[in-house]
């Protein structure tokens, strides 16, 4: 599959997110990962070739490995072989390999971030306040340094075009309730600890990751995507050196390019240059192969 897909229009009720178009099939959802890309909470007009396929197949790879520990919504990737059986309408060929059938859950209005290393917004907050999301940290940490223990830093879940806001655990409890907050924190830590070890064995550091949860049959389950270059910072272990920013296998080229354009909130979204889009595709494909040991399915 080589088509760049930035929008879909299928015959079912749909909700459009920053990257995914989600269709309501009753007790299940069809989640189509487009090639849209967001940076600095801005959805850009240029698609990143094969990005949606990487998000779908890599999420599936992780879901199949964590299911015995953390309940989740994943059922199957939709392919040419199973589309007719699993989807109640004709699915365009360019949606094969980028669509997942999942169990429906009611999403919580918060996101869960587990940070194993200090980077990004956490590093900026630490330099300013000596803490991250209200969690006091030791003095003298270096940028990209590994924490003695991973820290759980939830955030609000913003609508398209708005900014997520880091929150403390008490605010998370106020948003979702005490029992769901406890389940989300414990399950996020379990997923991160497992995935971090798996990735290290493949020469990758997972510096941090964002997970989302929903309520299904009175149980808090993992939803959306899991441990992809869109939701995680992946660093090459062989090049890791604390004390500065790290090379990465995620959408950092797009973030860096957008920051360098001088774009400000309220400005029109600029087109991503071909070389930046191509570099991002290459990083996504590389991390997929490093983690799974296989090329992305054609």
Image (cartoon, grey):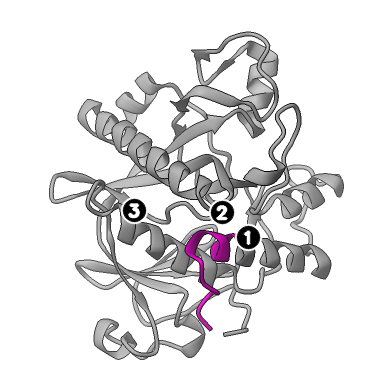
Report which quarter residue 278 is drawn in. bottom right
- Of all residues, the one furthest to the left in this rendering is 217
Count of all numbered marks drawn on residues in the image: 3
Mark 2–mark 3 distance (CA, rounded to whole Å): 15 Å
Q: Position of residue 274 (x, y in %)?
A: 81, 70
Circle nearer the viewer, 2 or 1: 2
Mark 2 is surrounded, within 10 Å at the Cα level, by few (under 14), some (14 to 19) or many (20 or more) other residues, namely many
Q: Which badge, 1 or 3, is on the more N-terminal residue?
A: 1
Mark 3 is surrounded, within 10 Å at the Cα level, by few (under 14), some (14 to 19) or many (20 or more) other residues, namely many
Q: Position of residue 192 (x, y in %)?
A: 42, 40
Quadrant, the N terminus: bottom right
Left or right: 138, with 20 as reference point: right
- In the displayed structure, would residue 199 be above or below residue 82? above
- In the displayed structure, would residue 139 be above or below residue 2? above
- Of all residues, the one furthest to the right in this rendering is 261
Q: Which badge, 2 or 3, is on the more N-terminal residue?
A: 3
Secondary structure found at label 1: loop
Secondary structure found at label 2: loop
**Are the residues at dot 2 and dot 3 in contact (C-beta closer than 8 Å)?**
no
Q: Position of residue 75 (x, y in %)?
A: 27, 68
Q: Residue at x 30, y 90 (%)?
A: 84
Is residue 82 something that shows in the picture? yes
The residue indicated by pointer 2 is 230
Q: Which residues are magenta?
A: 287-298
- In the displayed structure, would residue 118 be above or below residue 73? above
- In the displayed structure, would residue 116 be above or below residue 134? below
Is residue 45 something that shows in the picture? no
**Are the residues at dot 2 and dot 1 in contact (C-beta closer than 8 Å)?**
yes
* Rendered image: mark on residue 268: none
The residue indicated by pointer 3 is 223
The residue indicated by pointer 1 is 37
């Amino acid at each position: 599959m080589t088509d760049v897909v930035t929008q879909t229009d299928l015959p079912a009720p749909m909700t459009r997110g920053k990257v995914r178009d989600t269709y309501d099939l009753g007790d299940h959802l069809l989640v189509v990962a487009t090639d849209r890309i967001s940076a600095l909470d801005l959805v850009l007009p240029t698609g990143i070739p094969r990005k949606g396929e990487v998000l779908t197949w890599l999420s599936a790879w992780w879901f199949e490995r964590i299911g015995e520990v953390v309940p989740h919504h994943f059922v199957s990737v939709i392919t040419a072989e199973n589309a007719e059986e699993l989807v109640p309408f004709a699915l365009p060929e360019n949606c094969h390999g980028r669509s997942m059938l999942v169990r429906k859950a009611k999403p919580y209005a918060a996101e869960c971030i587990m940070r194993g290393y200090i980077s990004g917004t956490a590093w900026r907050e630490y330099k300013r306040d000596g803490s991250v999301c209200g969690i006091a940290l030791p003095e003298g940490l270096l940028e990209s340094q590994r924490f003695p223990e991973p820290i759980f830093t939830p955030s609000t879940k913003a609508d398209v075009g708005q900014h997520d806001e880091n929150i403390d655990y008490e605010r998370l409890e106020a948003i979702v309730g005490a029992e769901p907050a406890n389940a989300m924190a414990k399950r996020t830590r379990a997923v991160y600890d497992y995935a971090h070890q798996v990735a290290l064995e493949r020469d990758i550091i997972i510096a941090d990751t964002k997970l989302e949860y929903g309520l299904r049959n009175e149980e808090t389950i993992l939803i959306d995507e899991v441990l992809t270059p869109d939701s995680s910072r992946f660093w090459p272990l062989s090049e890791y050196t604390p004390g500065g920013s790290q090379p990465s296998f995620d959408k950092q080229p797009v973030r860096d390019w957008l920051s360098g354009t001088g774009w400000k909130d309220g400005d029109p979204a600029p087109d991503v240059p071909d070389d930046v889009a191509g570099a991002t595709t290459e990083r996504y494909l590389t991390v997929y192969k490093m983690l799974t040991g296989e090329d992305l399915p054609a």
